[in-house]
Amino acid sequence: MNFNCTDTKSFLESWNNKELNNKEVKTIFCPSFTELNTGVEILQYSDSEIGAQNVFYESNGAYTGEVSCSMLKNIGCQWVIIGHSERRSIFSETDEMVRNKLDQLISEKMNPIVCIGETKIQRENGKTQEILSQQLSIAFENQEDVNLKNTIIAYEPVWAIGTGITATVEMVSDAHKSIRNIFNNNGFNGSNISILYGGSVTDGNATELSELTDVDGFLVGGASLDVDKFYAIYNQL
């Protein structure tokens, strides 16, 4: 929950003035609901795209305060983050709720960014593979209509976000390989999906992480609040 309208406008206008020469890198900005229109307007003639930070799992009804897929689609939003670690931990979102949100996104032909990841205790107990498999299996159960080429998985090791604990490249590599294999083992073509790393990415570790075979990009948190730091990460891809 960062940036008001003025902040968002300033950031995105600064971004549009940067030299963005790497056409192989897709940038997706996910501002707060109140700033989506601003983002769509500023980026409409750029190669960058706009996503939302969340969505509700029903298409309409008496759900005061919630936002549906069709509402987001109507204003030009192309992507939606679901299952973010903060939504899971603070708002008690379950794997089933994430699946229901994915159902809605698929039905509206919108592009999902599905976040998964294990806690510190789960990793210490050797359950990383089990948790990732559970989260993905439930989310993608009976999702034959999903277009994996327009689907992103974001691996968020919860224990490495804002804690000062850094995941090693070996940990990241193992987790991303596991994610791709989980898709392959469940009837999907894992090579079609993009897997982002989202564990405290900075301009200091982006190069090393981006060189890993199964890391296709980043879900950037705190570093995305500074346009110059974010641009530095972009230039390392």
Image (cartoon, rainbow, N blue to C red):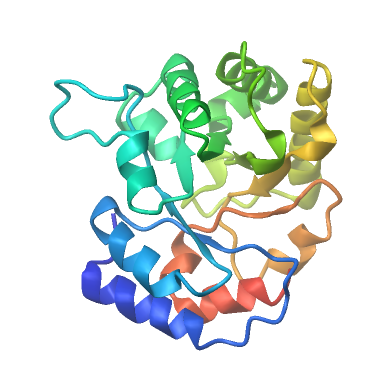
Relative image position of residue 34 (x, y in whole percent): 23, 56
Q: Is residue 118 left or right of residue 170?
A: left
Q: Is residue 218 left or right of residue 99?
A: right
Q: Which residue does the image show at 47% across and 78% down from the upper left? A: 227
Q: Quadrant of residue 97?
A: top left
Q: Quadrant of the C terminus?
A: bottom right
Judging depth in this view, the residue of 206 and 216 nearest the camera is: 216
Relative image position of residue 229 (x, y in whole percent): 53, 77
Q: Which residue does the image show at 33% across and 81% down from the upper left? A: 10
Q: Is residue 227 left or right of residue 36?
A: right
Judging depth in this view, the residue of 67 and 198 nearest the camera is: 67
Observer able to see residue 2 = no
Q: Is residue 2 above or below residue 62?
A: below
Relative image position of residue 45 (x, y in whole percent): 49, 74
Judging depth in this view, the residue of 138 and 75 nearest the camera is: 75
Q: Which residue does the image show at 41% across and 51% down from the upper left? A: 77
Q: Quadrant of residue 185?
A: top right
Q: Quadrant of the N terminus?
A: bottom left
Q: Is residue 90 above or below residue 166?
A: above
Relative image position of residue 95 (x, y in whole percent): 48, 18
Observer able to see residue 202 = yes
Tag count: 0
Judging depth in this view, the residue of 80 and 43 nearest the camera is: 43
Q: Which residue does the image show at 62% across and 87% down from the upper left? A: 19
Query: From this viewpoint, which residue is outermost toward the top?
Result: 142
